[in-house]
Image (cartoon, helix red, strand yellow):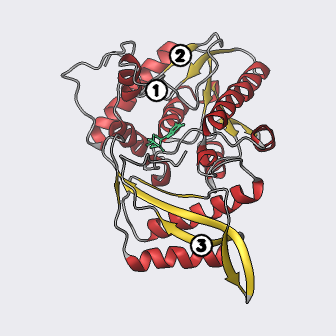
């Protein structure tokens, strides 16, 4: 395979078996070792499928020459930063710089209600935090990236600017290391599985770079964000326990209140909207018809366990007209 090319040859074998994944890993490791030599590689590790698989590959290829930086912007799903630390630092022994930038992001976002302004702040702040961390490290000459083939195709078609991990600093003078850039998503997952990454990471749902920031609607507050994170964790746990394979499932908490009654007292708390959709190409999406008992179980748990939420709704909107995310 030609790791220097941005073009996937028509006759390139699709990675569909563990044996093919292993053959790819062997080739990618050999190429990366030759490319990097005794240089040092920096990798922004979000915990998404693509950057996680690249991290696992680079650990195998260059081990101690890799420095991973994980920025927690405070908008991660419950347990996700912890999983990144557990898998890459504790289990795989990677050098991992963990930056808890929660306060920094949430302070910048305070009072900002416009969705595009929120996205902009999150993207810009991410670049700043990452650049600051990179500046503290010495002797880095390579930047690892989880670019995959659809990113290249979309960039070429100018469908969207290629954004890995929220867009990295463009003025960092590093040579790129992009070992999975000719692979499709299913192949990246196959390689991740072969590298021993946990299923929860390999089959992770697509998750927007701005994270829960676009699901905590309007101006983000810490208490509403905390309620969203807890409700989201319940939805994930219940759908996981039911063994369902669904493209994306998550919660949204709007910045409005609804009346309820709790312990004989009037409550005035947030509603929570549950959204479960299936999609093949992200351009269109269908609402998954969930079993009624499962919906009732999710509702009961959110109402009983999440402070501040007194109402649960299920979003029946397909895409189009509704986009996947509410913001
Ligand atoms: P929409 O809401 O446009 O979402 O139907 C399509 C897919 O893209 C994800 N999404 C994002 N991903 N940054 C990202 O990295 C974003 O700002 C963003 N907004 C939406 C969404 O979760 C869905 O998979």
Return the disc, 1 or 3, that comes first in the chain's sequence: 1
Q: Where is residue 245 in the image (x, y as percent from the top left)?
A: 36, 59
**Side (left or right) of 202 relative to 103:** left
**Which residue occupies 34% across, 49% down?**
285
Looking at the image, residue 209 sits to the left or right of residue 179; the answer is right
Image marks 1 and 2: residues in contact by CB distance under 8 Å? yes
Where is the C terminus found, in terms of image quarters? Answer: top right
Mark nearer the N terminus (2 vs 3): 2
Asked whether the viewer can see residue 126, the reply is yes
Residue 176: assigned label: 2
Question: Residue at label 3?
Answer: 311
Q: Nearer the viewer, mark 2 or mark 3?
A: 3
**Residue 147 tag number:** 1
Query: Is the residue indicated by label 1 positioned so its CB lies within 8 Å of ligand 1?
Result: no
Residue at x-position 47% and y-position 49%: 204
Q: Which of 301 and 267 is in front in this view?
A: 267
Checking the image for residue 182, the label placed there is: none
Question: Counting other residues with Cα less than 10 Å from the Cα at mark 1, is it few (<14), some (14-19), or many (20 or more)?
Answer: many
- Few, some or many C-alpha atoms within 10 Å of disc 3 (few <14, some 14-19, many ≥20)? some
What element does badge 1 sit on?
loop
Q: Is residue 306 visible?
A: no
Of the pair 47 and 283, the residue shown nearer to us: 283
x and y percent of residue 46 in the render? 59, 38
């Amino acid at each position: 395979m030609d790791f220097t090319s941005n073009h996937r040859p028509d006759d390139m074998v699709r990675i569909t078996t563990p044996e093919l994944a292993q053959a790819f890993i062997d080739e990618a490791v050999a190429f990366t070792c030759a490319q990097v030599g005794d240089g040092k590689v920096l990798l922004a590790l979000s915990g998404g499928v693509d950057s996680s698989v690249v991290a696992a590959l680079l650990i195998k290829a260059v081990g101690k020459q890799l420095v991973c930086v994980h920025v927690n912007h405070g908008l991660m799903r419950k347990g996700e930063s912890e999983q990144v630390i557990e898998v890459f630092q504790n289990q795989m022994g990677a050098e991992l710089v963990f930056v808890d930038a929660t306060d920094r992001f949430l302070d910048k976002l305070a009072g900002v209600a416009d969705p595009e302004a929120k996205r902009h702040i999150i993207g810009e702040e991410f670049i700043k935090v990452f650049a600051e961390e990179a500046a503290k490290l010495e002797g880095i000459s390579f930047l690892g990236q989880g670019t995959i083939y659809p990113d290249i195709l979309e960039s070429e078609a100018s469908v969207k600017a290629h954004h890995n991990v929220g867009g990295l600093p463009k003025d960092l003078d590093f040579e790129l290391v992009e070992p999975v850039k000719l692979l499709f998503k299913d192949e990246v997952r196959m390689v991740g599985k072969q590298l021993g990454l946990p299923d929860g990471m390999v089959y992770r749902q697509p998750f927007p770079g701005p994270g829960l920031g676009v699901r905590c609607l309007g101006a983000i507050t810490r208490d509403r964000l905390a309620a969203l994170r807890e409700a989201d964790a319940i939805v994930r746990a219940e759908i996981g326990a039911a063994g369902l394979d669904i493209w994306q499932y998550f919660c949204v908490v709007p910045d409005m209140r609804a009346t309820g009654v709790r312990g004989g007292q009037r409550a005035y708390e947030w509603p929570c909207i549950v959204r479960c959709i299936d999609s093949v190409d992200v351009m269109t999406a269908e609402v998954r018809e969930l079993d009624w008992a499962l919906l009732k179980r999710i509702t009961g748990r959110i109402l009983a366990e999440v402070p501040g939420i007194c109402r649960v709704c299920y979003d029946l909107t397909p895409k189009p007209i509704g986009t996947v995310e509410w913001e």
